[in-house]
Amino acid sequence: MQSSIAEPSSRLFKRIRTVSSLGIVLDGYNLSVIAVALVPLAREFHLSAAQTGLLASAMLIGSIGGGLGAGILADRLGRKTLLIWDLVIFMIFSAVSAVLFNYAWLVVARFIVGIAVGADYAISPTYLAEFAPRESRGFHLGYIWLAWSVGAVVSFGIGAAVVAWFPAQLSWRVLFGLALIPAAWGLVLRHKLPESPHWLQFGRTFRRAAGARPRGALPPRLWLLAAVPWFLMDFSTYGLGLLLPLLLRSNGLTSTTGAILGTGMAALFGGVGSVWAMLRLDRSGRIGLQVRGFFLSGAGLWVLAAALWLDIRVFAFLLGGLMIVNLFNGSGPGTTCGIIPAEIFPTPVRATALGISTAVSRVGAIAGVFILGFAEVRYGLGAVLAIAGSASLLGSWLTWIWRIEPNQTALPDIPGG
């Protein structure tokens, strides 16, 4: 069954798109800025490799629970309520993490920030998809994932300046605290938004009619396509991206500022790829872009790994290669992995499905941080790039095996619709 719900006005829809994207901007900023903040934090708290990995992963671990819990609650209580409360939690614990002096409590605070961020991953794409016209839904959902790159690039640009201008013990506090400014603006805007008409007509009504859980089994292929490629994408991109400034610096390839700016340039090219994908999603579909992007980024990482094994250790070459790899990733899985779950699941379980997919992807990111960190210590940077490349190549193959193309189709509103 498909709905015939009226589309919102152009002005209202632009506000919905902007506010939906804000949470992903904050995620891109916070998950990337920790890579910058780890440089002064490691010196101030004298962090071991294990402590560095735990702090880098705290938000990712929190986002697992945030995605799962908020997805289920958004399908039961509505989208708007959760959109407001996740920002409230985010603001409180972002402020707390900026004033702490204890490593253990800092990990806890960043964990709770991660819960709020994971919640937004489950709700924002769901909310926007339920308002977007199907003929241009890919472009609008691509806007959300471009917002992640914007947040990441801003974090590295601001991070390089803050680390250079402020004392080490103050710089990371400033970086954590700056996230409060856009969050406060977003909280005001979210109070003014309407509830999703899809949820009002089909999510809430269907649950009441069918009981606590919607009837109708969903094919396993939907869950596999939504979760596994996203796991592999986050394993590669987060695992490599969060450690990259430390990897570049510890391998003697550049200075601290150069490592931060270099990582930011790589993230910028991911954003350029997302713009390219946005313009093609409604023409080419999601699956082809994801297969292509995974394959090219995986092949690129293997080329860089081979260069390091051949002792070609030129910073400009490595950085240029990583920029191209991020371009390929942004033009494919970096944009599409978060779109597909919002389009292939029915309304009563859409947010839950996105929450589960988010949680699985964050398990991949955490695994990437620890596995790639261990591989660098044991086998070198070349092994890190080869493992990340293999994950991307596997993602390309599995996307093709489980392919379901939602382009230009109406959102399913009930199981079997």
Image: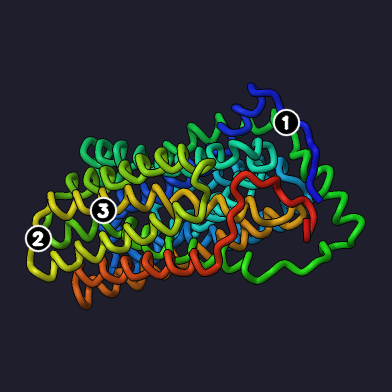
Counting residues from the N terminus, which is met first, the one under dot 1 or under dot 2?
A: 1
The secondary structure type at the circle numbered 1 is: loop
Packing grade of label 3 (10 A; few <14, some 14-19, many >=20) is: many
Q: Residue at x 68, y 58 (%)?
A: 352
Where residue 214 appears, as percent x and y from the top left, is: 82, 62
User: Mark 3 = which residue?
Assistant: 39
Nearest the eye: 278 or 56: 278
* Quadrant hosting residue 153: top left
Which residue type does callout 3 highlight?
A: Val
Between tags 1 and 2, which lies in front? 1
- Marks 1 and 2 sit apart, C-alpha to C-alpha, by 54 Å
Q: Residue at x 61, y 63 (%)?
A: 356
The secondary structure type at the circle numbered 2 is: loop
Packing grade of label 2 (10 A; few <14, some 14-19, many >=20) is: some
* Quadrant hosting residue 47: bottom left
User: Mark 2 = which residue?
Assistant: 313
- Marks 2 and 3 sit apart, C-alpha to C-alpha, by 22 Å
Counting residues from the N terminus, which is met first, the one under dot 2 or under dot 3?
A: 3
Nearest the eye: 16 or 174: 16
Nearest the eye: 285 or 326: 285
Counting residues from the N terminus, which is met first, the one under dot 3 or under dot 1?
A: 1
Packing grade of label 1 (10 A; few <14, some 14-19, many >=20) is: few
Q: Which mark is residue 7?
A: 1
Compared to residue 384, the image places residue 327 above or below, namely: above
